[in-house]
Amino acid sequence: MNQKTTMLSSELNTYWGEVANTFQWKKKWDTIQTGNFTDVNVEWFKGGQLNITENCLDRHLEKRRQKKALIFEPNNPNEAAAFYTFGELHIAVSRFANLLKKKGIKKGDVVCFYMGMTPELMIGLLACARIGAIHTVVFGGFSPQSLFGRLIDSKAKLIVTHDGAYRGDKVTPLKSMVDEALAMNTDKEKTSVETVIIVRRTNNDVDVVAGRDYFYDVLIKDCDLHCPAEVMEAEDPLFILYTSGSTGKPKGLLHTIAGYMVHVGNSFKDVFQIKENDVFWCTADIGWITGHSYLTYGPLLNGTTTIMFEGIPNYPTPARFWEVVEKHQITHLYTAPTAIRSLEKFGVEIPDSFPMKSLKVLGSVGEPINEEAWQWYHKHVGKNKCPIVDTWWQTETGGIMISPLAGITKLKPAHATLPLKGIVPILVDEKGNIVTELVASGNLCINTPWPSLARTIYGDHERFKQTYFSTYKDLYFTGDGAKRDADGFFRITGRVDDVINVSGHRIGTAEVEEAINENPHVTESAVVGFPHPIKGQGIYAFVTCNDHFDHPEDLEKDIRETVQKIIGPIAKPDVIQIVLGLPKTRSGKIMRRILRKIVENDLENIGDTSTLLNPECVDLIIEGKK
Ligand code: PRX
């Protein structure tokens, strides 16, 4: 397949029609694609009917019933790994689906998952899809308050959680965090949760509210092994996944069944050049889009064995990743640059002592991979023989958009290279003109619809239009900047909006500022990203406060706790600098651009500060920089 083809829109549709034909439909579509970016009403495969779980499970049963579908590698290496064949996974999904039905869940209802990484999470998502319920996974690193906000927004009726989740040497008491979230109900703001299902994992004590809370192991015993797959329309919702933006509260991106399936299934096969006996390990948590698309749906749609890892890269030792590769004879390892950099610091001796002969392809996702990390990954993990696919995509895009095809596309360190067939990225300059020169840089947009584009922000289509389709006319704006070289290869340079990418996690600066401002001692704050050797970007918060503190570290600690409580530990600022004033324009707007230059040590490019309302604060901030 040739990635360089420039396709006309009729050819694009023909191509996507051919791809869609490789899946199983209960009824074929009437139209391949309708709608456009002007009206923001894109739809794919209208009139088609299907169930994605039949594509993930049922259709493999004839050939692959005994083949391993899922391998679960626990947090603790002394605990045995667990396996599910396609046949067993099919049964487990059917039983969980029947459990949901018994608890009153119907087509169109929303089910929330707030769990650690165990098989029941993947089984639960597929169980929802089996009966036409919509899943929404909230990453276990988010606080009860964040969970509450997402429960309100999604109107989830049932929540599945763990008594506790293991991560390294920690246990996160998820069920009590759910209790805390549900206790935030008020008359004005009330979740729709009627049922809580508790999957036992850590066996810590949990409170059980009669008539609301049930143990999974108790209920599942009586659930039938058969569950017919609900007939779904192509454009019915599959899931909602929350992600941060540059403004306001997190956005619940809604993905629909057929388009998502078609692009995710196909891109998995093409990018990773998957063969029948491959064993695919995506290290992402299912709480993020990568875990949805390339740990769960992509592999299962292709009948590929997928690995689910409960733990973290350096527990109990920094050799864990390489041990897992050897143990399960992994052929494809798909991870984030931040994980690579965090293991890099323990030295080359560790990966060098593992031959990892099974590995064929390495993947990178979630943030720009710096050249040094790319080379380290290539040499010490891939032993100079595995291509690295640097895959660029987003929660909104559903699946990979720009990436080498393993073993086919020429590799260039730190470059996502070329768009996948059917995807048309372009660069746009500041004025909104499409950049026609080949070698150029600009803001990255997508020119034509593709099947796995999110259809809306749940409950707020206007915001969806505003966020992605209003910056540039008739284009989808990604929020990323990119460069294009003489080969037409793209290199993603990072976000151009107020979003920080911390360890591959998207965090909106506005969201962190709002949380910091909740601290009673804080008057104002401004948050910017700064280059961080391991996390890619770190969070730097400038704060003005209304009290005098003899020990500013006490206030810093307090602010971090506030952020942890409101958003979760992932959004805690790495650096907090208490300042007397923040640089502002005469109209009172905080000049984050100046603060960004300060944290990047790029003082030469701060620009003219004399027109500021309070230019004197800039020198003070520079003096106090940490
Ligand atoms: O800035 C880009 C960065 O991650 C953002 C999307 O984040 P999220 O929706 O959480 O999805 C992450 C997993 C797909 C993008 O806007 N990003 C993602 N992949 C890459 C990347 N930046 C550079 N290179 C990549 N390969």
Image: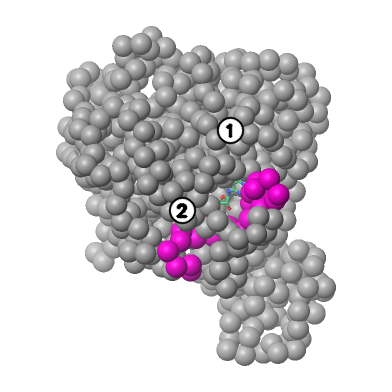
Residue 475 is a magenta residue? yes
Quick check: 411 left or right of 465? right
Q: Is residue 349 above or below residue 213?
A: above
Disc 1 residue lies near ligand 1 with CB under 8 A: no
Question: In percent of the image, x 81 and y 24: which residue is there?
Answer: 349
> Which residues lie in the magenta part?
471-495
Image quadrant holding the C terminus, namely: bottom right
Residue 312 in view of the camera: no
Distance in Å between CA atoms under marks 1 and 2: 27 Å
Q: Which residue type does callout 1 highlight?
A: Leu
Quick check: 212 left or right of 390? left
Q: Nearer the viewer, mark 1 or mark 2?
A: 1
Q: Which residue type does callout 2 highlight?
A: Thr
Disc 2 residue lies near ligand 1 with CB under 8 A: yes
Dot 1 or dot 2: first in sequence order is 2
Q: Residues within 10 Å of mark 2 (few under 14, many from 20)?
A: many
x, y (%) of residue 450? Answer: 41, 47
Question: In percent of the image, x 20 and y 20: which residue is there?
Answer: 226
Q: Is residue 619 above or below residue 463?
A: below
**435 or 122, nearer to the observer:** 435
Question: In percent of the image, x 33 and y 54: which residue is there?
Answer: 42
**272 or 604, nearer to the observer:** 272
Q: Identify residue for label 1.
A: 405
Prevailing secondary structure class for the magenta stretch in the rendered image: strand
Q: Identify residue for label 2.
A: 243
Residue 610 in view of the camera: yes
Q: Secondary structure at mark 1?
A: loop
Residue 241 is a magenta residue? no
Quick check: 526 left or right of 458? right
Residue 14 lies in quadrant: top left
Q: Secondary structure at mark 2?
A: strand
x, y (%) of residue 342? Answer: 71, 39
